[in-house]
Image: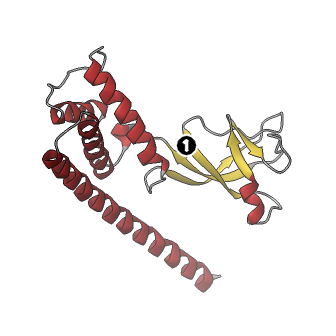
């Protein structure tokens, strides 16, 4: 499994520096690599992939009528809410730690909600193919930020694009299998029902 330390060491090597055994250092290159990793990881995971998207999660209402969104959720989209049309589900957004009704201008919802969440996972929990892409993206970003030459930049871009293509191919395979399972389940319910 690829973790934060491996990605940062790969970035350091790419810019011509030695790796580190721990990330608890004040070395400026490590601090810069951590910043780049944080930025790239958030941008990458915020898209919502097969591995970090949780569907039809029930969020309960608390005693104050509020619906709390998990702290590690990057985004939330209402998938089902009692007596609301599909268009009305779009009126809800995350504000702070609660779901917010943008029509009524309140975070008092007074009912449980089913949502789709995009969760931010630790890098060590990412599928290897996703962590590999992130590693190459970070290395390219670190090198470009370090005023790297065009020849090596093109090489790093090529590595990143190869990793991206593998990631997208895995996503398509996963979505196809998931879509087929859903289709078969629907056919079975219709046949037996």
Is residue 161 in sight in this rendering? yes
x%, y% of residue 118?
53, 48
Is 31 on the left or on the right of 82, as rendered? left
Q: Which residue is mark 1?
A: 74
Nearer-the-camera pick, 56 or 136: 136
Nearer-the-camera pick, 28 or 56: 28
Answer with the quarter of the image where residue 49 lies.
bottom left
Q: Is residue 16 above or below residue 139?
A: above
- Of all residues, the one furthest to the top in this rendering is 26
x%, y% of residue 20?
20, 22
The residue lying at 35 percent from left, 68 percent from top is: 173
User: Which corner quadrant holds the N terminus?
Assistant: top left
The residue lying at 27 percent from left, 29 percent from top is: 5
The residue lying at 29 percent from left, 41 percent from top is: 141
The residue lying at 48 percent from left, 52 percent from top is: 47
* Crowd tier of the residue under label 1, counting other residues whose Cα lies within 10 Å: few below 14, some 14–19, many 20 or above: many
Nearer-the-camera pick, 186 or 55: 55
Is 57 on the left or on the right of 124, as rendered? right
Answer with the quarter of the image where residue 3 lies.
top left
Q: Is residue 42 above or below residue 18?
A: below
Label 1, secondary structure: give it: strand
Q: Is residue 65 above or below residue 164?
A: above
- Which colour scheme appears in the figure? secondary structure
């Amino acid at each position: 499994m690829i973790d934060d330390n491996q990605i940062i060491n790969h970035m350091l090597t790419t810019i011509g520096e030695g790796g580190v055994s721990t990330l608890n250092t004040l070395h400026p290159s490590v601090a810069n690599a951590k910043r780049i990793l944080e930025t790239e990881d958030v941008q990458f995971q915020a898209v919502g992939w097969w591995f970090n998207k949780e569907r039809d999660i029930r969020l309960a209402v608390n005693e104050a009528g509020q619906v709390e969104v998990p702290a590690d959720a990057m985004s939330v989209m209402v998938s089902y809410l009692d007596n609301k049309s599909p268009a009305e589900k779009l009126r809800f957004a995350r504000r702070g730690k609660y779901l917010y009704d943008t029509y009524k201008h309140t975070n008092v919802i007074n009912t449980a909600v089913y949502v789709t969440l995009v969760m931010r996972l630790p890098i060590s929990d990412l599928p290897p193919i996703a962590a590999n892409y992130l590693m190459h993206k970070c290395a390219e970003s670190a090198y470009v930020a370090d005023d790297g030459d065009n020849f090596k930049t093109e090489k790093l871009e090529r590595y990143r694009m190869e990793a991206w293509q593998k990631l997208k191919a895995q996503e398509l395979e996963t979505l196809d299998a998931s879509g087929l399972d859903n289709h078969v389940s629907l056919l079975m319910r219709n046949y037996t029902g």
